[in-house]
Each structure stands twice: as structure tokens, then as C-alpha cells.
Amino acid sequence: MLRLRSCLLLLIAATLPVTASASDDDKASAQSIHGYAEEVIIRPEGIRLKARLDTGATSSSLNALNKETFERDDEEWIAFDIIDPEDEDKKIRLERKIVRHARIIRHDGNHQRRPVVSMELCLGEHRREADVSLIDRTALTYQMLIGRNHMKDIILVDSGQTNIQPPRCDD
């Protein structure tokens, strides 16, 4: 009896029409395939960095050194250095308004409090504002990590490829 019911349910399910909503079609056409490592441009400065696209990370992070918080127009800001991608002995100083502080749970179970800034990033043909936490990543291969929040609905990651979508945002 149970076997007959299971077969009947499978038969009914197989005959139901499969449909996709228009929004699903729009999402699929707006998505592009990227490798697990790509170049990203930080705007408006135009700084090109190698970034790792990490579907296991919720948010994005950037290698930030010599961080100094300060106040500007009654708001909390941060100045920080990134390693110049053209000469790793040089640093580039950036300033951004802090939008919040994130509590990050590390793989070892410890917690970190990181400043988060908003940055406009160009990845492939996609230009998008992203929340980016600032942390020292000098021991890691990539200065920038792009997380799921930034890739949502626009980027699919091919884990076997790198550098297949160079930045090409229209100005």
C-alpha cells in the first residue's frame, strides 16, 4: 500500500508543469560567472586589487593597516593603509566613514570587533556598493575577500577558474 502511494505521488509530481517566474529569469540573465579569484576595482580611487570570491563568507573584508579612527562632521571615520598592488613596499592611504562595527566569529571560535565601511566595488561588469570589514589580511594571499552579501543575485562562482571576468564597469 505504501509503495503504491509513493508511486502515485511520483506520477502526479512528474506531470505537474514546471514554471519559472519572470523574476527568476531576470536574475539568471543578470548573473555572470566568475572565478574564485578575480580583480576588483575600489572606486572612486580606481585601485585594482586581486580578490578571492568566497561563498563561505557572509561579508566582504579588506586588508587594512595602520587604522586610525577620527571624527568628521560629528561622524566616526577611519583612515587606513592598503598595500599598493603595483609596489608592495608602498602603501595607499584611504579614508571612509564607519557605517557600523561587526562582531565576527572566527574559525577558532574567538570573536573580533571590526569597523565596517561602505565601498563601491567593480567586479566584472557589476558595480555595487558593499559593506566591507577592515582587518589585517597581510598573511593571506588576497588583500580582499568578497563575500556572499556582495555576490547575491549577480555573481556565480566557478571554483575551478580564476581571472575570467576583468573589471569593466562603465563610468
Image (tube, rainbow, N blue to C red):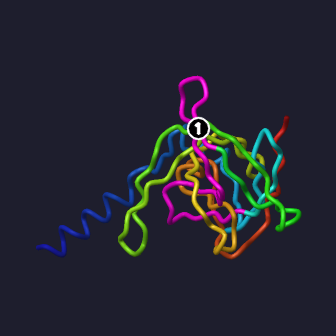
- Residue 121 position, x and y percent, is 71, 46
Quarter of the image where the N terminus is located: bottom left
Q: Please tell me how crowded label 1 is: few (under 14), some (14-19), or many (20+) other residues with Cα within 10 Å.
A: some
- Residue 22 position, x and y percent, is 55, 37
Residue ID for mark 1:
70
- Residue 54 position, x and y percent, is 58, 65
Which of the pair 153/148 is nearer the observer?
148
At x 58% / y 54%, what residue is drawn? 134
Quarter of the rendering containing residue 165: bottom right
Quarter of the rendering containing residue 139: bottom right
Q: Is residue 156 above or below residue 77?
A: below
Element at label 1:
strand
Bounds of the magenta span?
51-78
Quarter of the rendering containing residue 25: top right
> Looking at the picture, which amino acid does disc 1 mark?
Phe
Q: Is residue 141 left or right of residue 21?
A: right
Which of the pair 39/112 is nearer the observer?
112
Prevailing secondary structure class for the magenta stretch in the rendered image: strand
At x 32% / y 63%, what residue is drawn? 11
